[in-house]
Structure formats: structure tokens, C-alpha cells
């Protein structure tokens, strides 16, 4: 039994289910379909998948518990939470890394989500019901390299995100996706089963599940697996600290964390089973890059009778899943600025959301007229993604893990996590103290060679 805290909580989730749904909505998004498929494709498939699973289990899940525990105990945003729990100590720097990550991730996330809106509209109008004369791949490339069109869709998506965030936690965030996520899950399952009937099924499954052992010698596969685990679970930048802060004591954290992590991973695996058989069936290169899902999916829909309707439903649900994730990203920054400057939620959401929209424009242009600007051989969008997902998020996670493991009183941390003084509670602390930090540092050290 844990006691209520003395301080009156601020806004709160309206129901126990509300928190779980919102956290699931944050986790399940473009990361599970767009990012998972292209990163898996670029990193050789099964070996990457194994590393990704291990990162979820030994790093992601314990850090998710750490974020929930910090947030619910401190009842504040990501910076304020560290300041409340460890006044006058430098842990709050982790909070600033989190706010910075929110800006960077949402800036390019809005671009990709804009693509899904564009595809949704083009299925609505019927344009994509059959292959355009130039083919789906060229169609996609023409769109993303265009100077203004993708930015327009990015703008529309960001406006929707701002709209949800300014309505506020209870009314906006909590209600999105209550219905849509289960429908997306069912549609993914149906499409994955369909993909298994395609000619590329054997090859696709082998790619996903039968590892090429030599890939384990590549340091970038570890870094990619770590980054994908953080990105997909929405970890390392305090999104789940912020959501945990709207939580009361009634919710039991470990159960919530297990279900969120397993559901999120399941979405990714099912998406993989949907995409990779089709990749091989339609002769697409698995390492195609960030557009992999966008060039593969239309081929799947094209091969189904009335597949245009399926495509329409799919891109609608994907955009909705992206929206509930984007909301959690914006909320991290908005919660911080509301407290810091005492601005209204409405003003903060609009100003911060608009700044993030502007920040995302170079990522979009970097695929077209600014494609000559590269950082370590990558375009602007990929570089932003790499910086935030593979460096800032694991770094934030490292700070969160060491804070709960070392910077906080052990018995208090165990009590506040709802683990209590149990064996699993001790295992959790042990992982946060040693296993997770050491693994993250090792992956970083091995990756340093990548820049030489
Ligand atoms: N997890 C989301 C996805 O898979 C993206 C996301 C939302 C995120 N909030 C986050 C990623 C916080 C990192 C941190 O699409």
C-alpha cells in the first residue's frame, strides 16, 4: 500500500484506462510502421530485430517504469520533476535534453506524418487506387522532393497536433485513439495475413526472423536497435514522465508498463510481417530507406480487390496513430513552458507547435532542393532522426536510469514504482543501476568508431 502524496495533483486523467490508452497512443505511431520497417530493412533484418527485443527488455521496460515513477511522484514536467525530486542537483539537465529532443523529433515526425495525410487524401480521391503512370515509387519521390507540397501537409498535421494539445490532457489527449487503435490493430493483422499469401512470404519471413549472424559484428546495428527501442516506446525524453505526472496513485505502474511495451512491440512485429513479404514480392530493396513503407504499402493495396478502400482506411488510421504520438511529443514541451513562464495552455501549444513546424521545414527541403546539404552523408531528416533517436534519447534514458538507480533513495523508488520491496523491485533497481547504463555506454562506445 502506498500513501497519497501531500500535494494536490494538477490535471489528471479522467479514468485509469485513460492513462494507459494515452501512453499506448504515444508509443504506437509511425515508429512502429514507418520507422520500424525502414530501420529493420537498412540493418539487415533478423539480427537487428533480436537486438531491438533485447533493448526493450533490458533497457526500455525498466526505463519506462523509471519514467512513470518519476512523473507520478513529482507531479511535474520533465525538467520540473528532476528539480522537485533532486533540488539543486544537476539531474534536471536530463530534462532539458528531453525538451530539446521533443523539438527535434516532432520537427521531422510532422514531415513524415504529413506524408501519411497526403496518402490518405489521395486514397480518398482515388488517385492511388491504381498505380500512377510513373509508378508508386516515382510518385512518392516526386512528392517528397517537391518544395512546398509536403510542407503544406506537414503544416496541416502540426495544426491538428496543436489542436489536440490545446484542448488539454483530459479532453484532447485522452480521448484520441480510444476507438482507432484497436481498429488499426485489426487491420494490421488482416494485412499481415494477406502478405503471407504473397510470393515473397518465405523470403520476407526469413529476412525478419532468420538472422545473418555476421550482422552482430556491426556496431551500427546495436545503435540502431537501441535507438529504435527508445523511439518506439516513447522513452528517454520524459514523454512518459509527463504522462505519469497526470496520474494518481490508483494506477499500478508495472502492469501498465508491461502492457504498453508488449503491445507496442507486437504492433511493430505485425507491421514487419505485413511489409517484408511485400518488399520481396514486389522487388523493392529492403534498404530503400525512410520511404520503404510508403513505396511498399500501395503495391499491397493495389494487389487486393477494392484495395483502395483498404489503403484509405490504413492511411487514415496511421495518421491517427501518428497524431496521438505527436501529441505526446508536443505535450512534453508545452507542459514545461506552461509551468516555466506561466503561459496559458492555448498560447503555449500554438507558439511552441508553430516553432516546431518551422524547425521541420529544413528536414522536408533536405529531400529535395536542399539535398546537397548532408551531415555524415545523410540528408537533414535522417540526421535529425539519428541525432535525436540514437543519441539524445539513449542519453536521456541513461540519465533517467542513473537518477532512479543512484540519485534517489532506493526504498522510496521501489515504493513509488508499486514494485515495493519485492524481488522484481530489486531486479529493477539493479538493472537501472548497472545493466541499462552499462549497455547504453557500451553501445555508444562501440558506435564512436562509426564516425571515424
Ligand atoms: N513512439 C512514437 C512512435 O512510435 C513516437 C514518439 C512519441 C516518441 N513520443 C515520443 C518517440 C517520445 C520518442 C520519445 O511513433
Image (cartoon, rainbow, N blue to C red):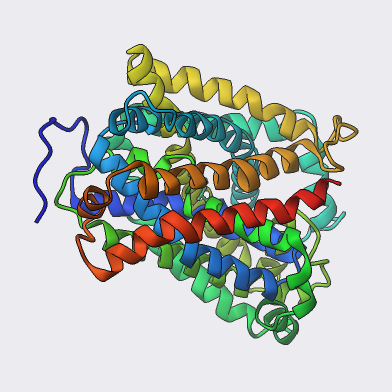
Does residue 153 appear to the left or right of 414 in the view shown? right
Q: Does 114 appear above or below 290?
A: above
* Image quadrant containing the N terminus: bottom left
Residue at coordinates 72% horizontally, 34% vertically from top-left? 363
Task: Name the residue at 22% across, 48% down.
Answer: 412
Residue 385 visible to the viewer = yes
Task: Answer left or right for 405 relative to 158.
Answer: left
Rendered view: 168 above or below 324: above
Coordinates of residue 213 in the picture (x, y in percent) = 75, 79
Who is closer to the viewer here, 55 or 103?
55
Q: Is residue 354 above or below residue 51?
A: above
- Residue 309 location (% of width, % of height): 56, 62
Q: Choose between 334 and 425: the one closer to the eye.
A: 425
- The x, y position of residue 149, in whole percent, is 72, 33
Q: Would you identify the image quadrant in which residue 143 lies? A: top right
Q: Position of residue 391 (x, y in %)?
A: 64, 44
Which residue is more in the foreground, 52 or 423?
423
Please indicate, yes or no, whether residue 318 appears anywhere in the rendered image. Answer: no
Q: Residue at x 37, y 12 (%)?
A: 341
Amino acid at each position: 500500500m502506498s500513501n497519497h502524496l501531500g500535494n494536490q495533483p494538477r490535471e489528471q486523467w479522467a479514468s485509469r484506462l485513460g492513462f494507459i490508452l494515452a501512453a499506448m497512443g504515444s508509443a504506437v505511431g509511425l515508429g512502429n510502421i514507418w520507422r520500424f520497417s525502414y530501420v529493420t530493412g537498412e540493418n539487415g533484418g533478423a539480427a537487428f530485430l533480436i537486438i531491438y527485443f533485447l533493448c526493450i527488455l533490458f533497457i526500455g521496460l525498466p526505463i519506462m517504469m523509471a519514467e512513470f515513477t518519476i512523473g507520478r511522484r513529482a507531479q511535474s514536467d520533465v525538467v520540473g520533476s528532476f528539480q522537485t525530486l533532486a533540488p539543486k542537483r544537476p539531474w534536471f539537465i536530463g530534462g532539458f535534453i528531453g525538451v530539446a529532443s521533443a523539438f527535434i523529433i516532432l520537427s521531422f515526425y510532422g514531415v513524415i506524418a504529413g506524408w501519411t495525410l497526403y496518402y490518405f487524401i489521395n486514397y480518398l480521391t482515388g488517385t492511388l487506387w491504381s498505380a500512377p503512370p510513373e509508378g508508386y515509387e516515382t510518385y512518392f519521390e516526386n512528392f517528397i522532393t517537391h518544395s512546398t507540397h509536403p510542407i503544406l501537409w506537414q503544416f496541416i498535421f502540426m495544426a491538428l497536433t496543436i489542436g489536440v494539445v490545446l484542448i488539454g490532457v483530459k479532453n484532447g489527449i485522452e480521448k484520441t485513439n480510444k476507438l482507432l487503435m484497436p481498429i488499426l490493430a485489426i487491420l494490421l493483422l488482416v494485412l499481415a495475413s494477406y502478405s503471407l499469401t504473397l510470393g515473397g512470404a518465405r523470403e520476407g519471413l526469413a529476412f525478419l526472423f532468420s538472422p545473418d549472424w555476421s550482422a552482430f559484428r556491426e556496431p551500427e546495428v546495436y545503435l540502431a536497435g537501441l535507438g529504435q527501442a527508445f523511439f518506439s516506446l516513447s522513452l528517454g525524453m520524459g514523454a512518459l514522465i509527463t504522462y505519469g505526472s497526470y496520474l494518481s496513485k490508483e494506477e499500478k505502474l508495472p502492469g501498465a508498463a508491461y502492457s504498453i511495451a508488449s503491445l507496442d512491440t507486437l504492433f511493430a512485429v505485425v507491421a514487419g510481417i505485413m511489409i517484408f513479404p511485400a518488399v520481396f514480392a514486389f522487388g523493392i530493396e529492403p534498404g530503400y530507406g525512410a520511404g520503404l513503407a510508403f513505396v511498399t504499402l500501395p503495391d499491397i493495396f493495389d494487389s487486393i480487390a477494392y484495395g483502395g478502400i483498404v489503403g484509405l482506411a490504413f492511411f487514415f488510421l496511421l495518421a491517427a496513430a501518428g497524431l496521438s504520438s505527436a501529441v505526446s511529443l508536443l505535450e512534453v514541451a508545452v507542459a514545461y513552458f506552461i509551468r516555466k513562464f506561466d503561459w496559458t495552455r492555448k498560447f503555449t501549444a500554438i507558439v511552441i507547435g508553430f516553432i516546431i513546424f518551422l524547425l521541420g521545414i529544413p528536414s522536408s527541403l533536405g529531400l529535395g532542393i536542399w539535398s546537397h546539404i548532408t551531415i555524415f552523408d545523410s540528408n537533414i531528416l535522417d540526421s535529425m532522426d539519428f541525432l535525436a533517436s540514437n543519441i539524445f534519447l539513449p542519453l536521456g534514458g541513461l540519465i533517467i536510469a542513473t537518477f532512479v538507480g543512484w540519485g534517489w533513495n532506493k526504498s522510496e523508488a521501489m515504493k513509488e514504482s508499486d514494485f515495493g520491496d519485492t524481488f522484481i523491485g530489486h531486479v529493477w533497481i539493479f538493472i537501472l543501476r548497472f545493466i541499462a547504463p552499462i549497455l547504453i555506454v557500451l553501445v555508444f562506445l562501440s558506435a564512436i568508431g562509426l564516425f571515424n
